[in-house]
Amino acid sequence: MSHSTDIQTLFKTLGLPCPPDSAHGIEVRTPIDGSPLARLAVSTDAQVGEAIARAQTRYLSWREVPAPKRGDLVRVFGEAVRRHKEPLGRLISLETGKIVQEGLGEVQEVVDICEFAVGLSRQLYGLSIASERAEHKLLETWHPLGVVGVISAFNFPMAVFAWNAALALVCGNTLVWKPSEKAPLSAVALSGLLLQTARAQGIEADGLAELLLGERGVGEALVSHAAVKLVSATGSTAMGRAVGVACAAQFKRSLLELGGNNAAIVCPSANLELVVRGVAFSAAGTAGQRCTSLRRLIVHRSVHAALVAALVRVFERLPVGDPLAVGTLVGPLIDERAFDAMQRALDAARQAGAQVHFGAREAVGGAAAFYVRPAIVELANQSGPMLQETFAPILYVVPYDDFDEAIAINNAVSHGLSSAVFTQDLREAEVFTSARGSDCGIANVNIGTSGAEIGGAFGGEKETGGGRESGSDAWKAYMRRATNTINYGNTLPLAQGIKFEI
Ligand code: UN1
């Protein structure tokens, strides 16, 4: 069966119409072998305006629905996603080249955030605060924002939307989603399932979660529209900078979750077997195409040689190949540009005198597919391409002598998403997670940098953008806060003791 036929079967299994082919649309190809999957119509300027207008109109009634009832929609949606876990996971694999296990894992992340949001729909709590005045109280109340724009990247074509949508919807917002032009089919399927769920519950689906397809121009139209009150954008730092600046100029909120140049420190006491497993998943998993992928390994000189040798042995044998085949651990890169960027980084490292293990193209999938063996690059110190995020499986390894120096190396890059320390030493673990430790949004102990659970707030500092999505109190980004002072007496005392007698 061709991959495009597979797509048609998948949409049928999901009970959704297969998106019609459009002669001049975006061509979607599978990175598995480069063959075409579909050609999808691009949203016109007029369609962008209409979609946002529908979302704005829908918001006016959606905000009146009690939050736990809004949670009901998210609950039933999550159940539908769970029921369709297999076809949805396969769709992700076909479109992004993720191995089956990781495609399924991403769908599970959608289910998990839906469950989280359902519980949250009975919370959305504010504080009650002591007033300085007699017979007064201070309260904090939380209200929806309005239309939330979501811009998502190719590498998590379902989970990132779900983090935003599950929270935004229970908070009383409506959505307009512009997915990556490299993974629009996953978006068509997931948003289709959401709207199908709404209709089956008798909920008006129009405007609840609108989908816009296209390239940069469509995203720009979304960001600049006055009715969009928050733009949540996941992707490159360059994209985030453009979105952040455009939002700031309009005093519009933005929630940015951008790149990462994530590191792990390996201390002398670390359990090296555990390190090798953690590093292999974080650095080679998803072919290095997670924003949380491990890109830098900072290893104590006393264990450096042994660890590099062990990693080389593992990387040499990593099964690279068809992501749909059982046993494959490393699928293809998304496209030729990603492959070229990887090769450029490896060339630069070689020129800087690095020892490069692997990283070449593997003869799988034909001329239009880009499979590589994940690379290990030994450097004497952190320099050159190691300071940049290359969205590909390259693991730079540098030695360190002193723990404070290792933390300084961890923090000396422009991104601040994820980080980890491998140690059995309590002091090192505590210092790493303290104020003078890692400067990242995620700081782990004895696990890799990727694969965060949805229960925590997800995001990072510096050029990662500062936004937090997913768990903890990330929901607050999707609401506005009002402070209410309530006088239940018959006098009017002024705060700060001010006298104003008339
Ligand atoms: C991303 O790559 O944009 O922590 C998100 C992780 C996943 C999410 C990654 N839960 O690796």
Image: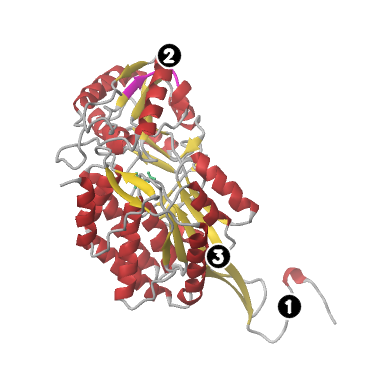
Q: Which residue is mark 1?
A: 493
- Label 2 vs 3, first from the N-terminus: 2
- Give the secondary structure at mark 2: helix
The range drawn in magenta is 376-382
Cβ of disc 2 within 8 Å of ligand 1?
A: no
Residue 48 is tagged as none
Q: Which residue is mark 2?
A: 351
Q: Which residue is mark 3?
A: 480
Say few, some or many: other residues with alpha carbon within 10 Å of mark 2 (under 14 / 14 to 19 / 20 or more): few
| Kind of residue at disc 3 | Arg
- Label 1 vs 3, first from the N-terminus: 3
Residue occupying the point 28% across, 44% down: 36
Please state which of the two labelled residues, at mark 2 or mark 3, is closer to the viewer.
Answer: 2
| Kind of residue at disc 1 | Pro
Q: Is residue 47 above or below residue 424?
A: below
Extreme residue toward the bottom, this view = 490
Q: Is residue 91 magenta?
A: no
